[in-house]
């Protein structure tokens, strides 16, 4: 199977389903992007880790990482290798005691695990060819601009500084996000995270 390596571009709310998110993956050595619809819990699990926000108690994916570390299990890579009826399928490729194991998983869970292990993510060329979107294709179709990467600085180098009011708003949202995580109100944390992302992208 020929596969291409991808990374996470960002997350955005999905217009197609309430409470769902679009996870955007981009090809490292190419110009294609692959959107995958995932659930809110998995989106939170991915975003919190990418933003280095540590919840007071471990998520399911954090628990898996802790157990894997305790038993010297290493995640080598994640491969999104099947697409049937608009549903993606993935495998977590693990190694323990020198033996390689492939474990079936949903792409959202697999990627939430990948960001915790620092494991590379791959997509089969067949899937990328079928479901990937090229940048020029998006422009021709009049699609919305790319979703900003999670935690990515909104302004380019040399851009004007944010107005003071925007800075204060950003700081208050960050404080509220930390408080929501500490109180384990992850629904509110997700809302605040999205508002912070919008503030970054509009500045």
Image (tube, rainbow, N blue to C red):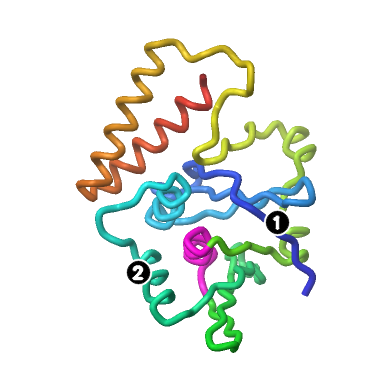
| Residue 93 position by quadrant | bottom right
Q: Is residue 35 left or right of residue 42?
A: right
Residue depth check, mark 1 versus mark 2: number of the one nearer the observer: 2
Q: Earlier in the sequence, mark 1 or mark 2?
A: 2
Which residue is located at x 54 percent, y 30 percent?
153
Camera-side residue: 163 or 190? Answer: 163
Residue 31 position (above or below residue 157): below
Which residue, given by chain and number where applicable, does mark 2 sit on?
Answer: 63
Q: Secondary structure at mark 1?
A: helix
The picture places residue 128, in percent across and down from the top left corner, at 73, 59
Which residue, given by chain and number where applicable, does mark 1 sit on?
Answer: 131
The picture places residue 92, in percent across and down from the top left corner, at 56, 74
Locate the N terminus by quadrant.
bottom right
Camera-side residue: 80 or 142? Answer: 80
Which residue is located at x 35 percent, y 20 percent?
169
- Magenta stretch: residue 107 in it? yes
């Amino acid at each position: 199977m020929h596969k291409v390596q991808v990374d996470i571009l960002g997350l955005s709310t999905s217009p197609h389903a309430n409470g769902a998110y679009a996870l955007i993956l981009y090809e490292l050595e190419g110009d294609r992007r692959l959107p995958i619809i995932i659930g809110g819990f998995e989106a939170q699990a991915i975003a919190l880790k990418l933003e280095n926000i540590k919840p007071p108690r471990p998520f399911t994916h954090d628990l898996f990482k802790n157990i894997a570390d305790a038993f010297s299990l290493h995640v080598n890579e994640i491969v999104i290798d099947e697409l049937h009826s608009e549903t993606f399928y993935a495998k977590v490729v693990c190694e323990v005691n020198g033996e390689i194991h492939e474990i079936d998983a949903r792409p959202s869970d697999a990627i939430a695990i990948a960001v915790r292990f620092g494991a590379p993510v791959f997509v089969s060329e067949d899937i990328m060819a079928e479901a990937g979107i090229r940048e020029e294709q998006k422009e021709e179709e009049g699609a919305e601009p790319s979703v900003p990467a999670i935690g990515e600085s909104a302004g380019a180098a040399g851009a004007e500084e944010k107005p003071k009011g925007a800075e204060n708003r950003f700081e208050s949202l960050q404080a509220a996000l930390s408080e929501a995580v500490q109180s384990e109100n992850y629904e509110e944390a997700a809302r605040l995270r999205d508002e912070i992302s919008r503030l970054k992208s509009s500045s």
